[in-house]
Image (cartoon, grey):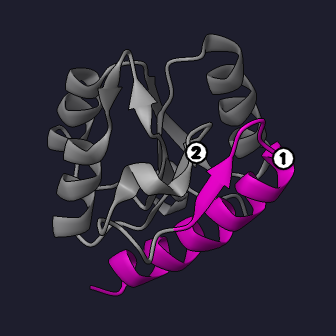
Amino acid sequence: MSKQPSEQPVVLVVEDEYLLAFDLADSLGDHDLIVLGPAPTIPQALSLIAATDKIDCAILDVRIKGEMVFPVAEVLSKRGIPFVFTTGYEKSVFGDRFTDIEIYSKPLDIERVVAEIATLAHNHCVKRANG
């Protein structure tokens, strides 16, 4: 029995590097995840979040088009949606913010990141489905 689209976890990808965004989206699809985005700007990411209540997890590049992604992270946090950060920056850019969020350094081990995202997304999808 195949899964209906509403039963598949949805992952928001916020990444402005085209090739990396494509690789992430492709790998997420290989793990039976629906990709929302990739969003290459903060306004596009916020618009995607506002347009749906079916996001199960997110991958956020810390710096998007010269802006820090923290407004997106704050909205996701308020909605109880798990996410991870990807970055080429040191952890010090976070200060005291988001100390409990997983941070993956670039260049990414895409399979490792996607495997963790798949687990987070599937767990959140089950939680969302059960109310």
Q: Residues within 10 Å of mark 2 (few under 14, many from 20)?
A: many
| 126 drawn magenta | yes
The number of numbered badges drawn on the structure is: 2
Where on the picture, by quarter, is residue 45? top left
Gap between marks 2 and 1 measured at Cα = 11 Å
Looking at the image, residue 54 sits to the left or right of residue 8; the answer is left
Query: Where, by quadrant of the figure, is residue 120 drawn?
Result: bottom right
65, above or below 35, in the image: above
Residue at coordinates 69% horizontally, 35% vertically from top-left? 24
Badge 1 local density, few (<14 within 10 Å), some, or many (20+)? few
Identity of the residue drawn at 58% across and 45% down: 86
Q: Which residue lies under the disc numbered 1?
A: 109
Which residue is pictured at 40% across the width and 83% down the height? 127
Give how far across and how far down residue 88 sits, in percent.
62, 36
The percent coordinates of residue 47 (x first, y second) are 18, 30
Name the spot of residue 129 as percent of width and height, x first.
37, 77
> Magenta includes 89?
no
The magenta region covers 102-131
Within the image, what quadrant is residue 25 found in? top right
- The residue that disc 2 covers is 86
| Label 1: element kind | loop
Lower position in the chain sequence, tag 2 or tag 1: 2
> Type of residue at label 2?
Thr
- Image quarter of the C terminus: bottom left
Residue nearest the viewer, comparing 59 with 106: 106
- For the stretch drawn in magenta, the main secondary structure is helix
Residue 16 at x, y = what percent?
A: 50, 18
Q: Nearer the viewer, residue 117 or 31?
A: 117
Q: Amino acid at mark 1?
A: Asp
